[in-house]
Each structure stands twice: as C-alpha cells, then as structure tokens.
Image: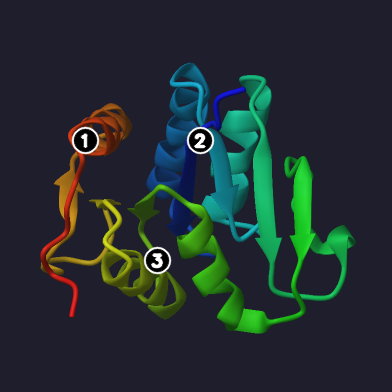
Amino acid sequence: MQQKLIIAVIGASQASPRGVALAEQVGRLLVGQGAVLVCGGLGGIMEAASRGCAQAGGEVIGILPGASAADANPYVSLPIVTDMGHARNVIIAQTAHALIAIEGEYGTLSEIAIGLKLGKPVVQLDSWAEIPGTLQADSAEQAIEIIFAALQGGFINDQRG
C-alpha cells in the first residue's frame, strides 16, 4: 500500500471570516488530491480546515498540545495527544510533507520556520509577508496547485542553514 501525502494546514487560532473560508476550502481540496490533513487539532484555521476535510470524507490528524483527546475539534479523526504545548509544532512540521499557512500568529511563524528548516515546501495564504523560502498563493486552489507541483517536482528549499 502506498503512503498517503500528509499536508499540514497551520494558522491562527482566532481566524477572520476570510481565513475560515480559505481553510475550509483547502481542507476540501486536499481530499480531492488524496491527501491526509494534519493540524494542531484545535479551533480557528485548524478547525475550519478539519471541517472542510472531514465533510469531504477525508482523514484529519490533530497533533494536540494538551493531555486530552477531548480537546480536539469535532472534525479530528485521529487525535494525537502530546502534552507538549507549543513544542508540538515540531511534530506537525515533521509529520507533514508540506505546509500551508493561513493567517497566523507566532505559533504559525514557528511552524513555518521549522518546515523551512526541514526543507519542506511552505505555501502562505494571507499569512506572514516576505519570509524567504516560502511560496505565496492568492487562493485556496492556487495553494493546492503550488504545494502539489512542488512535491511532484522534487522541491528543494535552499534556505536551510
């Protein structure tokens, strides 16, 4: 059996209405590509992406910061309890083949940095501006297109160091 691609959707726990709509659409589109979603398993962008993915019939891995699976948003099908707080961001970036950042704060910035350090494609959609090594998208469809093109093309991030 071939392993499925795992794509992280990372972003703000307090999301704007546009961010929520983008995340939900990204979650749905990932299912159409046969990918599994990994996220932090809580609210905001994480919950919206999870909802889009789950409603389209996909799998959602939630890497939770706390000690209880009950903390996961209702769309997480595979909760991973870490009791590691923000340190779980490393697990999210390590687990994913690529990352899509939507909006976000410093936790998202840390996941972007870890993903880049690991040499993984990172697409930003209404997220942090001008981070060297990231790829920019203007829509959910473009974010998916960029991520899968980067993965198929043997993406190499030369910003590591």
Mark 3 or mark 2: which comes first in sequence? 2
* Residue 147 placement (x, y as % from top left): 28, 38
In front: 92, or 144?
92
Name the residue tied to disc 1: 146
Alpha carbon of mark 3 to alpha carbon of mark 1: how far? 20 Å
Q: Is residue 140 visible?
A: yes
Q: Earlier in the sequence, mark 2 or mark 1?
A: 2
The three-letter code of the residue at mark 3 reads Gly
Instruction: Report the quarter where the N terminus lies.
Output: top right
**Side (left or right) of 54 relative to 112:** right
Quarter-of-image position of residue 25? top left
Q: Residue at x 19, y 39 (%)?
A: 138
Q: Which amino acid does label 1 sit on?
A: Ile
- The residue that label 2 is drawn on is 24
- Give residue 3's quadrant in the image: top right
Q: Residues within 10 Å of mark 3 (few under 14, many from 20)?
A: many
x then y, percent, for residue 110: 39, 77
Dot 2: element? helix
Residue 104 shows which numbered tag?
3
Residue 3 located left or right of residue 64: left
Q: Is residue 111 left or right of residue 92?
A: left
Residue density around tag 2, few if under 14, some if 14–19, many if 20 or more, within 10 Å: many
Q: Are marks 3 and 2 in contact (CB under 8 Å)?
A: no
Which-is-in-front pick, marks 3 and 1? 1
Q: Nearer the viewer, residue 151 or 100?
A: 151
SS type, badge 3? loop
Spatial CA distance of label 2 from label 1 is: 18 Å
